[in-house]
Amino acid sequence: MKYDFDKIIDRKNTNSLKYDFAVQRGKPADILPLWVADMDFAAPDEVISALKQKAEHGIFGYSEPDEKYFNALCGWFKERHGWDCDKDNFVITYGVVHAICSLVRALTDEGGGVIVCQPVYYPFAEAVTDNGRKLVVSELKNDNGYYSVDFADFEKKIAEEKVKLFILCSPHNPVGRVWSKDELKRLGDICLRHNVFVVSDEIHCDFTYGENRHTVFATVDKRFEKRCAVCTAPSKTFNLAALHIANVYIADRAAREKLKSELSRQGFSQPNIMGLIACQSAYEHGANWLDGLRGYLQGNLDFLRLFIKENIPKVALVEPQGTYLVWLDCRKAGMSDEQLSDAVIKAGLWLDDGCMFGVGGSGFQRINIACPRQTLKLALEKFKTVFG
């Protein structure tokens, strides 16, 4: 089936965080936004149809996921990622960030150490510090644009800071790494040695490029399955973020019950019915749409790579193995983070400043390429003017 990802959909005046709240966030009203990680593509028709059918039914009472929901969920991960997951080990939450914050509170004590590998998705740090825990940072190594874990530093920090929780970003946002099974094994072995529980954010798992393949952390080693929580959601894959649904897999019963108790303290019980319907429909019927989207994103990445090479020599593309968020190295321009941010905004473009992702992010910008190519081209033309 042919999908029209070139279609421009007007998102203004739709309560869109991306398009309608620039002024409230200190940006010009007419700025072009390629910052926040949602896509400018409509969800699959089957998902929209399922939501319409529920809306027409007209009753939106308390709802729970049923057998069909979990069959769709487990079937998706079996088919796409080779993961045989037990439906009884899932806990439903509002979203992956909500799940991470809840797991931090459920599995660590106030003041306890939680480690992350920066630069990384900035809500990780907020999930730690906002909940009164100690943020411990192991900086990723950047070898001429190829990022890797500094395993020696990672283990040293865990031991020194008495870390009990590791928040893993897999695939990694913003640097675009799809961690190999060997890398995940080394991380897991270190965490086992020091009794560190792993919270693996795998929300971008369905987006990889070329020969890169995502490995679910729980599948790397049977020992790891009992010492981790795998956080997934259909939100990034099918552009469903505002429906607030995530599926957290925890094989260890004690850890799972601790999360459930924490959710109960928050007053969370039944999830959003529209989120349940959208998730089930997407996992049942969205495979062809996703395959088409992945091909389109590859085309966008190819376009961006060539544009930068031919037009912006001061910027280096950090070649992504996964995600639709691209990390751009602007350090050769010789600007401070504030100067770079101001110049990008002055050019009429809204990207994410690299410094917000923590240690190692200074001098970078993150751009979201999940948009029609015409929009991406316009954004890159604006970006070009930043560097003369």
Image (cartoon, rainbow, N blue to C red):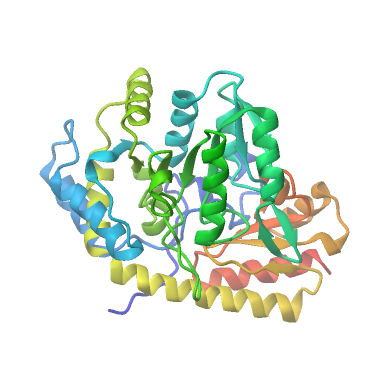
At x 66% / y 41%, what residue is drawn? Answer: 155
Taking 17 as reference, is 133 above or below it? above
Left or right for 383, reference 197: right
Residue 314 in the image: x percent, y percent?
Answer: 81, 69
Examine the image and state in which quarter residue 294 appears.
Answer: bottom left
Residue 61 in the image: x percent, y percent?
Answer: 16, 32
Examine the image and state in which quarter residue 285 appears.
Answer: bottom left
Farthest residue to the left: give it: 57
**Residue 117 visible in the current orientation:** yes
Q: Of residues 50 and 87, which is closer to you in this image?
A: 87
Residue 114 in the image: x percent, y percent?
Answer: 59, 32
Left or right for 385, reference 215: right
Left or right for 278, reference 381: left
Residue 224 in the image: x percent, y percent?
Answer: 43, 45
At x 26% / y 51%, what residue is drawn? Answer: 278
At x 62% / y 27%, what residue is drawn? Answer: 129
Examine the image and state in which quarter residue 72 appears.
Answer: bottom left
**Residue 356 visible in the current orientation:** no
Taking 183 as reference, is 187 above or below it? above
